[in-house]
Structures are given as C-alpha cells and as structure tokens.
Image: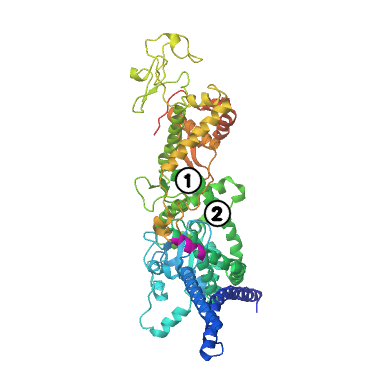
C-alpha cells in the first residue's frame, strides 16, 4: 500500500472515530432524557407484579411517572427544535449543468479519478475559497427543487438531468421501486461544491482542476453514514443556538428558545473538540487522496490562490466600495480581478510572469455565459459586503467599467465636495478673499460680472448678511485681510478650494482646532445620511440570503468605520480633484489597484495624497499650493457640485 493510501486510510479512520464520539454525546443526552422514564417503568412493573407494594411505593411510582412524562415532553420539544432548526447556508450563485456543462464535466472527471462520489451540484461564491456544503436539511427541500441557488433569481440555468437522476430535486427516477427509494434514503446525498468566482476568471483550467482536487476528494469521507450523521447533529445544535439568539422573538418564544439554546450550547461544548478533530481527519484524508492528481501543478496553483485573494480584496475595497456607496454596483467584478492582477504584475516585480499565463484557456470558458454569471456574482458581492436590495433599481443600478470614471469617480468627488461645503456653511466659515464667481439660488455658478439678487447679499459681501446695504462701514463686520477699506464688495463666491485651504491652514483660527471641528462636522453629516438609509435584514432580502439569518446587511463589512481625519482627507482630496477637473482640464480615472484617481494629460497623479495630508494633519497648505500652481489649477474659482 502506498504512503498516500495509508495516509488516506488513517485520516478517514480518525474522522470516523471522532464522528462516533460525537454520536456518543448525542446518545448520552438521549439516555439522560430516558432515564426517568426507565425508572418509572421499573416502578410500574414492580407495582403490577406486587414486588413493590405499599403506600410509599405508590406515591413514588406516580411522582416518578409524572416527572418522566414531563422530562420526555421537554426532551421531545428540544429535539424537535434542534431537528427543525435551519442551518445557515452560504450565500451563493447556483450554476446548473446546462449553464456550465464543461465545468460539470471537469468536476465529475476529477471525482472519477479520485474514486469519490461527485458533488451533487456546483455553486459560486464571491470569495477566494472553495469548500463542500451539505444542503440536505429537510427545511431546504422546496428550495432544492430549483437547484443549488436557494433563492429566486440567483441561480444560472435550470435543473440539470444529472440532478434529477440523483434525486437532488426531491424526486425519484421512475421504475426504481421501493428498494431504490430505501437505498436513496440510507445513502446521504453528496454535498454541493462551492467555488470562489474569482478563481474562474483568474485561474487557467488546469490550475482550477488542481485546486479543486482536494476539495472534491472530501466527498469520499463525507459519504460515510457516521460522519454525515455527526455533521447533521452538530449543524442542528449550531442552528438551534442561532435561533435562540435571533432578535424579534416574543417573551414566551424567547424563554422557550432560550432554554433550548442553553441545552444546545452544553451539547456543543461536549462534542465541539471531537467535531473539530473529525473535520481535520476528513481534510487530511481528502488531501492525501488528492496527492495522486496534479500534485506538482497544485503547488504552483496555490500561488495563484494567494495572488487572486490579494487582487480581489484590493478590488473590493478600493474600486467596488466607492461605487457601492454611490448606489452603483460594478457588474463585472470577476473580470476586474484579471485587470487588477495584470496591473499588479506590471508594477510589482514579485508578480512578474503571472500575466504570461493569460494566453492559456481561462477557467471561465467552462461557463456557457460568463457575463451572466459574473453579473450575478457581482450583485451578490455588493449585497454581502455593502448591503442593498436584491434587484437593480433607480437607486441601485449596475455600472460598466467603461462608465466607472464618469458615473462613479466624478460623482463621488462632487458629492463629497458638496458635503464639505455644507459643513463649512453650517460652521459659518467665510469665503476666501479673491474668489471668482458666485452661486445663484439654484446652485449654478454665476460669473463675477453677473448680477446677484441684492436680497441675499449685504454690504459685507456674504450671503445672508444682516447688515443693510446703506449702513455705515463701521456698523458691519470688519473687512478680512486682503480687502482694501472702501473697496467695492465682491459677489458671494461659490464653493472654492481656496475657502477650504484657508480654513484648514488657520486663517479662521488655530489650524488644529479648525481641522478637528471640520472633521467632526463631516462625520456627523455622514452619520445622519447613513442613519436615514434603510437597513435590510438578510432574511428579508430574498435570493441567496434567504436562508442566512436575520442579521442586517452588510453581513461582512469591508472596512472598519473611518476616523474623522480620514473622512476629512477624502473630502479635501475630492475638492482638489473637482477643482483640477473644472479649471485645469484634468479628468477622473480608474486605477485597478487604487480605485478613483486623477488623470492629468492622461497620466495618473499619485502624488496628491501626501500634500493633502500635510494640509489636513499639520495645517500646512504650501505643498498643496505649489502642486496646484504647477498643474495650473485655480483654487479661487468655484467648482460644479452635484
């Protein structure tokens, strides 16, 4: 026997031993529940035969019988809740055999080479990981009729002939008879193979097969009845604990489920270590069995797994997240991973050579309609990591990569610039001297030579001034430095970059205090906007999240809450970019690794961040002024806002 076969046998045997240990915990719990009933039976039989007669034995007999009935009722209720509790399913996009016949063929050929049962279905998840998932719980029976997607609108393709033949859809093949039905009940259904969608676009076909080999090999140990029963028991306990902690239960239901949750937690503590070691044994057995398939290529493919994870994380946090915050979701995220990793290989010498693989056949060619699958996975990623409705709408619409700079980047900058000036208006920060132009009542920029309604501008030159135009010079506010006494007042300036720079550089007070106050104002404004947005529970969102739970979306936030200084730096950067676009001919752009970027003469300018931080953190505006002068940006001119 080879070393691989020995390792496989040892891992599977260890997993079965641990599975029996988990089942023994279940048996002990059943024995504890039946113990009062057994004592009651002994007392009843003793009384019927006359061996345990007398008043004392009669009292004990009825007391123990009543206690046994109560214990049996409570145990039955606890067992029913644990058995009926629905374990959470991973949100996925179901892919049926009609939608990906080549992918199904690859997986089934791989299972045949490994001599293990083939997965019952394939689903995709917007993550860089792959695993097997059991979806045979009775609560998911009606959903499984629609395929592996567990929700309307999230699957791709219809139910496959292979699924109907294997009974995944809930039916049986005609002509099998009673014996065939009993065999199907006794043999656990194969789990669903969940594949990370970025793998299909970045990896080549051979690399994907090598990466999936140890995952598919896990169906062998999973088919063992003891391991399958132990897994069902542990998942039922975990689901019962989650049901007890779910908010929204009434007082009586909360009390009852609280007791069930405590019992389930006790049982989980008793079998948790055995379940963990059982899963380790299953993984070890699968890994050993997969050594016979593409072992050398798997070592190289694991490098691509790490690279794909880095590119996917960078794409979500730097590129997708700004679009999601603007109510747009990129509809080709998986295709964007290829562009991001290609750009990484161009910049980073450590990634050299990875882009040369792009000439080989990509794994996404195994899909009949890669664009449809990519769009479904992209929408699911937006819902998981940011939140939002299940379907596109006026406030939640897809965006292509070609439209991203204009519809996301430019809009993001102008929205943040508008928020920045709203906070400055609320703080009564005066415009910068020498500003050109003004804003009329509708928000449009008016040149300095145009007339502005006199009712909104007093002799001080500021909107809303309470000083009448005919008042004496000493009655109004004193002119700011840079205005000659008696000079003709300028119209009220519009939103300018100079106003922001003057305020943060300390012309309206200490620079540190000014920055702190502005950062706090932006944080409060953003918090009010987020509080006004509705939060959608996952179970009410429909689709692939219908069986996840009641947690509000997003389920997996990408970033921790940003500090006030971070928000201030982002808003000042947006204001600088708006001014550069409006006055210096710059353009919004998309960088695959850094997200929204400013393009000057078609070149990305990555040197803006340090100058903005110098202004925000230290109140030093000179580096930013020099940068603006070199590009020809006029900070005193108003910018167009949303």
Q: Could you say which disc has been placed on residue 321 in the image?
A: 1
Would you call the spot at circle 2 few (<14 residues within 10 Å), some (14-19), or many (20 or more)? Answer: some
Q: Could you say which disc has been placed on residue 309 in the image?
A: 2
* Viewer-closest of 217 and 527: 527
* Viewer-closest of 267 and 457: 267
- Quadrant in which the N terminus appears: bottom right
- Quadrant in which the C terminus appears: top left
Q: What kind of element bears circle 2?
A: helix
Give the vertical position of 486 relative to 637 (above or below): above
Q: What kind of element bears circle 1?
A: helix
Give the vertical position of 162 relative to 363 (above or below): below
Give the vertical position of 392 relative to 27 (above or below): above
* Viewer-closest of 609 and 210: 609
Q: Is residue 254 magenta?
A: yes
State left or right for residue 433 relative to residue 172. Answer: right
Q: Could you say which disc has been placed on residue 358 in the image?
A: none
Residue at the spot 38% in from the left edge and 78% down from the top edge: 172
């Amino acid at each position: 026997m080879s070393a691989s076969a020995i390792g496989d046998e040892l891992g599977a045997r260890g997993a079965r031993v641990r599975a029996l240990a988990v089942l023994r915990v279940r048996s002990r719990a059943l024995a504890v529940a039946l113990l009062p009933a057994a004592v009651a039976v002994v007392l009843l039989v003793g009384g019927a035969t006359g061996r345990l007669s007398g008043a004392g034995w009669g009292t004990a007999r009825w007391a123990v019988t009543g206690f046994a009935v109560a214990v049996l009722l409570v145990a039955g209720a606890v067992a029913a809740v644990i058995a009926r509790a629905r374990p959470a399913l991973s949100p996925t996009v179901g892919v049926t055999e009609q939608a990906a016949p080549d992918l199904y063929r690859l997986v089934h050929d791989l299972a045949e080479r490994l001599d293990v049962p083939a997965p019952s279905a394939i689903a995709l998840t917007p993550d860089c990981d792959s695993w097997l998932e059991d979806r045979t719980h009775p609560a998911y029976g009606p959903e499984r009729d629609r395929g592996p997607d567990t929700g309307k609108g999230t699957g791709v393709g219809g139910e496959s002939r292979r699924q109907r033949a294997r009974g995944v859809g809930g039916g049986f093949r005609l002509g099998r008879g009673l014996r065939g039905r009993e065999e199907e009940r006794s043999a656990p259904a194969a789990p669903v193979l969940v594949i990370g969608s970025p793998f299909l676009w970045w990896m080549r076909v051979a690399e994907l097969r090598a990466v999936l080999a140890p995952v598919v090999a896990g169906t062998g140990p999973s088919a063992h009845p003891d391991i399958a029963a132990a897994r069902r028991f542990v998942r039922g306990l975990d689901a019962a604990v989650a049901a007890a902690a779910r908010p929204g239960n009434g007082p009586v239901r909360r009390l009852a489920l609280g007791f069930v949750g405590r019992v389930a937690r006790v049982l989980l503590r008793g079998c948790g270590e055995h379940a963990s070691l059982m899963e380790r044994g299953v993984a070890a057995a699968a890994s050993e069995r997969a050594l016979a398939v593409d072992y050398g290529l798997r070592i190289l493919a694991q490098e691509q797994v790490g690279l794909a994870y880095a590119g996917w994380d960078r794409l979500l946090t730097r590129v997708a997240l700004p679009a999601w915050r603007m109510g747009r979701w990129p509809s080709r995220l998986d295709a964007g991973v290829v562009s991001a990793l290609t750009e990484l290989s161009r910049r980073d010498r450590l990634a050299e050579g990875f882009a040369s693989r792009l000439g080989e056949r990509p794994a996404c060619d195994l899909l009949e309609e890669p664009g449809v699958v990519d769009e479904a996975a992209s929408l699911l990623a937006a819902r998981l990591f940011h939140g939002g409705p299940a379907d596109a709408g006026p406030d939640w619409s897809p965006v292509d990569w070609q439209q991203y700079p204009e519809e996301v980047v430019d809009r993001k900058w102008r929205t943040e610039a508008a928020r920045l000036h709203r906070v400055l208006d609320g703080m009564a920060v005066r415009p910068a001297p020498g500003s050109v132009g003004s804003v009329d009542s509708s928000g449009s920029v008016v040149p300095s030579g145009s007339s502005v309604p006199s009712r909104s501008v007093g002799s001080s030159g500021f909107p809303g001034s309470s000083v009448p135009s005919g008042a004496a010079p000493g009655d109004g506010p004193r002119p700011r430095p840079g205005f000659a006494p008696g000079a003709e007042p300028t119209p009220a300036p519009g939103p300018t970059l100079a106003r922001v720079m003057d305020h943060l550089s300390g012309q309206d007070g200490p620079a540190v205090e000014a920055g702190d106050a502005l950062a706090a104002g932006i944080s409060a404004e953003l918090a009010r906007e987020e509080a006004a947005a509705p939060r959608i529970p996952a179970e009410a969102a429909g689709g692939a999240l219908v069986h996840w739970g009641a947690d509000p979306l997003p389920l997996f936030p990408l970033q921790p809450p940003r500090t006030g200084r971070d928000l201030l730096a982002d808003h000042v950067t947006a204001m600088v970019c708006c001014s550069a676009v409006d006055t210096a001919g710059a353009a919004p752009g998309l960088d695959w690794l850094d997200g929204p970027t400013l393009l000057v003469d078609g070149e990305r300018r990555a040197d803006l961040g340090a100058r903005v931080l110098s202004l925000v953190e230290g109140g030093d505006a000179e580096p930013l002024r020099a940068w603006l002068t070199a590009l020809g940006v006029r900070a005193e001119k108003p910018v167009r806002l949303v």
